[in-house]
Image (cartoon, grey):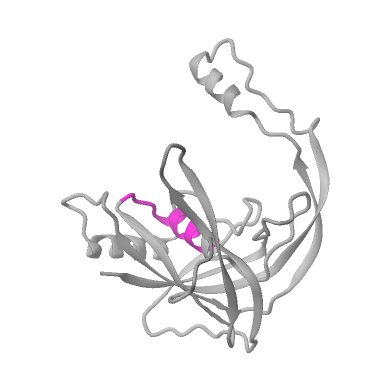
Amino acid sequence: MAYGFNVEIAGDYACFSRPELKTERVSYEVMTPSAARGILEAVMWKPAIRYVIDEIVVCAPIKLENIRRNEVNSKIPVRSERTAAKDLLNSKLFLSASNDRAQRASVVLKDVRYAVAAHFEMTDRAGPCDNEGKFTEMIRRRLRKGQNFNAPYLGTREFPARLRLIEDGEAPEPIDETRSFGLFFYDFEFASGPEIKFVPTYFMAEMKNGRIDLRNVEVLR
């Protein structure tokens, strides 16, 4: 059985990066289902539940803006992290951001506001004391109090998100716009086997009167 709730997500800037553009970030026109799920997991993550995004309602006009940001070019290799974990005293786990950064242009969203309809499903990792009512109350309480495990953000960590539980009886006001966004990133799908993989999935995004319905979407792999 699914238990649902509605959340308002807003922020001054957002960047939901298109995967086909690597060097300079270009945002999708609206929030992706994966980003919405990540924000909910920042509020409360439990292995016993899995969030499913049902609908994304665009409540503010879509505005894109060009900005320039300093970004670090390199990453610390995983092998170096493993070595440091084994030998903390003699390892050199260090990256100088001031000596290894570049300025890149980004196309980001400005003044975003969404109403996300979501529900959660119990997983096979739920314990005997876990139940839907308990988790529903925990999620609602944390949203009302502004509590979270990690700071929720809109695509990148420098763009924080403001969250609010949409109470029963409230109705979001979507923008009066209908358009097709084409092929759109949906989420990562876990694939088990000899090597653990996260397979990206996509869908054809259609916004009708400001609403993107994800309940019966056809996921493409």
User: Eyeballing the image, is 201 above or below 101?
Assistant: below
Give x and y (percent) for residue 147: 43, 56
The residue closer to the viewer here, 195 or 155, is: 195
Q: Visible in this render: residue 151?
A: no
Give x and y (percent) for residue 32: 57, 65
Q: Is residue 155 left or right of residue 188?
A: right
Any magenta on residue 40? yes
The residue closer to the viewer here, 160 or 5, is: 5
The residue closer to the viewer here, 61 or 49, is: 49
Q: Residue at x 64, y 56 (%)?
A: 159
Kindly give the residue lying farthest to the top in the view shown: 90
User: Eyeballing the image, is 121 above or below 62?
Assistant: above
Q: Residue at x 57, y 84 (%)?
A: 174
Q: Visible in this render: residue 61?
A: yes
The residue closer to the viewer here, 158 or 50, is: 50
Kindly give the residue lying farthest to the front in the view shown: 194
User: Could you tell me what secondary structure mostly forms the magenta stretch?
Assistant: helix
How many numbered marks, from 0 up? 0
Give x and y (percent) for residue 6: 42, 73
**Quadrant hosting residue 65:** bottom right
Q: Is residue 211 left or right of residue 128?
A: right
**Quadrant hosting residue 210:** bottom right
Q: Residue at x 81, y 58 (%)?
A: 67
Any magenta on residue 58? no
Q: Residue at x 46, y 85 (%)?
A: 171
Give x and y (percent) for residue 184: 61, 67
* Magenta extent: 35-47
User: Eyeballing the image, is 181 above or below 19?
Assistant: below
Quarter of the image where the N terminus is located = bottom left
Q: Is residue 115 left or right of residue 100?
A: left
